[in-house]
Image (cartoon, rainbow, N blue to C red):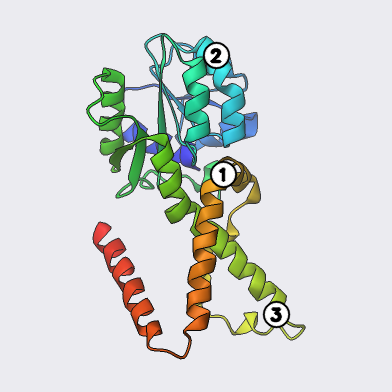
Amino acid sequence: MIGGSFALAARRALPKATFVGWDFPPVLLQAATLGMLQEGYRDLPPAIEGADLIYVALPIGVALEQLPLIVKHARADALVTDACSTKVILQRAAAIHFRDGARFLGGHPLAGRETGGVEQADAGLFRGARYALIAREGDPDPRVRAFAQLVQDIGAEPVWMDAETHDWAAGIVSHLPQLVSVALAGVIRDETDETGLPLSLAGPGLRDALRLAGSSYAMWRDICMTNSENLARALDRMAQAIEHLRANLRTREMQEQFRAANEVCDALRRMK
């Protein structure tokens, strides 16, 4: 979904470019039918040889496995970037493999949906989204500057940071909400009896709160494994916050908690 969305958006921004994909044959056929690429390969080397830009939209574990092969076949002046949700482990691996020639630029578009698959791709997915780039702002490498411009051309906002800062921040604003949604779904499932209550009484508010619970474990497994320390701290903070609410259900402190929550919601609305 992320790779397909990037391809659709980038094709609009770069109408003269040739887009090549690597995946299983049925996925490649579907991607070509949807206008994402002109060529597709089931083997990685011919898909990346000669490419100016190599966009790695893979699960983190698979991306790590493929880095040596990517380095081996990437053109010396190519830019290789990824869309993975954690950055520290990939940056460390890239520092080992990318020594000369092709440049690696870590990236993470803060956009997406709970459902995956190339059929879910959307050329407008990145509009208004933050797009983390793991480099210093003002990096003199023309490849980095060109990609940052492409990020803007597809409607996203580049945000420059180091890998450690990214994984801490993403752990709070992206990964923690996912796990909280999973936990909430688990509580509701366990509390639902043979009559279907309380789940059958749910309205749109619960559907909004549980949207992320529809995400696939296959997609989140590597995120949990590669950002476990930040996630553990975030879950500890969440547990403290829930305990604070439990202890103050009958006090005026609840008013302050709602006020603080409203401030965060207002700040998010202003960010759009």
Give the percent coordinates (x, y) of residue 219.
Answer: 60, 45
Q: Determine if residue 236 is in view.
A: yes
SS for dot 2: helix
| Residue at mark 2 | 46
- In the image, 172 versus 203, the foreground residue is 172
Instruction: Kindly report which numbered mark, 2 or 1, lies closer to the viewer in this rendering.
Output: 1
Q: Nearer the viewer, residue 2 or 250?
A: 250
Q: Which mark is residue 223?
A: 1
Query: What separation in Å lies between label 1 and label 3 (alpha carbons)?
Result: 30 Å
- Of callouts 2 and 1, the N-terminal one: 2
Crowding near the residue tagged with mark 2, few <14, some 14–19, many ≥20 C-alpha atoms within 10 Å: some
Q: Position of 29 compared to 132: left or right?
A: right
- Which residue corresponds to the image point at 70% horizontal and 80% vertical from the top-left? 192
Q: Residue at x 62, y 22 (%)?
A: 42
The location of residue 186, given as percent across then percent down, is 66, 68
Q: Could you tell me which quadrant the C terminus lies in?
A: bottom left
How packed mark 1 is, by other alpha carbons closer than 10 Å (few <14, some 14-19, many 20 or more), is many
Query: Can the viewer see residue 112 in this picture?
Result: no
Q: Classify 166 as above or below 77.
A: below
Q: Which corner quadrant of the image does residue 139 belong to?
A: top left
Q: Is residue 233 above or below residue 33?
A: below
